[in-house]
Image (tube, rainbow, N blue to C red):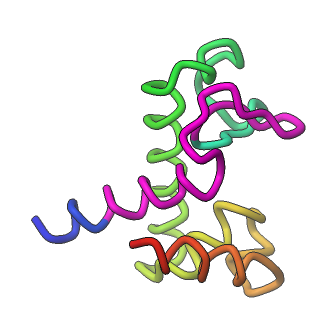
Amino acid sequence: FRRVLFRSAVAAAVEHVESRGEWWAQRGCHRGVMQTCTRWSRYPASLLWIPAYSREEGKRLLRYWHGRAGGDWSKALAAYRCGWRGLVGGCGSGYARLVLRRV
């Protein structure tokens, strides 16, 4: 139960850092409150503007990277930001610290 609460808190912190909750946020190919990249999304780009879809897709990506990081949230968040480079420590550590401070 604690893990689920912590995962939800991490997702809320990511949403705040990425878009401050603004559904119209856009940066490059990234859309919506979780700033999910349209290239890797299971949903079409137009649905990522809807907060529920953006959150669901963002949480799916967080679960994926958390599993790849062996349960290490710092690495998972760095990977959410930078992809595989973040997972091996190449970038994203500042982003991870920023998100984890909000949890």
Residue toward you, 26 or 47: 26
Question: Residue 8: x percent and y percent?
Answer: 31, 56
Residue plotted at (53% across, 19% down): 50
Residue plotted at (53% across, 49% down): 15
Q: Quadrant of residue 30?
A: top right
Q: Is residue 18 inside the magenta stretch? A: yes
Q: Is residue 32 inside the magenta stretch? A: yes
Position of residue 58 relative to residue 5, above or below, is above
Q: Is residue 12 left or right of residue 87?
A: left
Residue plotted at (21% across, 60% down): 4
Please state the total of marks drawn on the protein image.
Answer: 0
Region of the chain picked out in magenta, as a range: 7-33
Name, please, the residue furthest toward the top.
46
Question: Residue 60: x percent and y percent?
Answer: 46, 45
Position of residue 53 relative to residue 46, above or below, is below
**Which quadrant is the C terminus positioned in?**
bottom left
Name, please, the residue furthest toward the left.
1
Residue toward you, 80 or 12: 12
**Which quadrant is the N terminus positioned in?**
bottom left
Question: Residue 58: x percent and y percent?
Answer: 53, 44
Name, please, the residue furthest toward the bottom.
89
Residue plotted at (28% across, 68% down): 6
Q: Is residue 71 left or right of residue 23?
A: left
Q: Quadrant of residue 35?
A: top right
Position of residue 49 relative to residue 37, above or below, is above
Question: Residue 14: x percent and y percent?
Answer: 53, 57
